[in-house]
Amino acid sequence: MKTTVSDAKIVWTPEQAPAARRDLWAAFKRGLRGRCPRCGEGKLFRAFLKVDDHCPVCQLDFTPHRADDLPAYLVIVIVGHVIVPMILWIETDYSPPVSLQLAVYLPLTLIMSLVLLQPVKGAVVGVQWALRMHGFDDNVSDELSPG
């Protein structure tokens, strides 16, 4: 049975899932867009940072994801690498008053952080799924299962 990503009626059986190739780059891009890393159709989030329990299209269980604090750390690194050089360049070349700098840099940092947080978290969940991390591995042995 041949299935495509655009097919909205994909139903994955446990027998098909381990054989399915998991493309890291595609899962990363789908996560950035807030879509299911497997089918690319269903929404990944039910709220701003709350990952849904499962994909409404392909029924992929999202509960095993363990993004934890990694998205926040990555956003700090990304925003810091954009804002700090900009601050240093403007301070060195133009030397504006501190009040003007605070009025610009603080809101810009906050807005950039909020805009990036959900896409980065989606990308982390997508990468976890593609690399079969945590509970996204379909072939978990009984030795690793709790209980």
Image: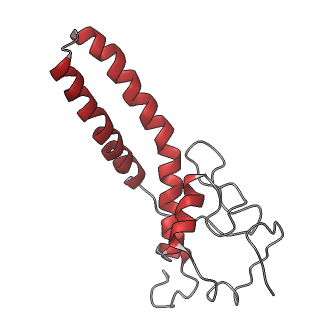
Task: Judge left or right: residue 77 versus residue 126.
Answer: left
User: How far across and down, in percent of the image, does residue 144 sit?
Assistant: 45, 85
Q: Residue furthest left?
A: 92
Residue 7 in the image: above or below residue 22 = above
What colour scheme has been applied to the protein in the rendered image?
secondary structure
Residue at 47 percent across and 51 percent down: it is 120
Q: Is 76 on the left or on the right of 30, as rendered?
A: left
Which percent across, then down, holds residue 105? 33, 22
> Is residue 15 toward the left or the right of residue 70 in the image?
right
Labels in figure, total = 0
Q: Can residue 20 be seen by looking at this rendering?
A: yes
Residue 16 placement: quadrant? bottom right
In the rendered view, does 110 fall on the left or right side of 96? right
Q: 134 above or below 88?
A: below
Report the residue at 28% width, 16% height from top.
101
* Quadrant hosting residue 23: bottom right
- Residue at the far right in the pictured view: 9
Q: Is residue 138 above or below residue 131?
A: below
Q: Residue at x 29, y 41 (%)?
A: 81
Q: Residue at x 29, y 10 (%)?
A: 100
| Res. 64 in view | no
Q: Nearer the viewer, residue 96 or 109?
A: 96
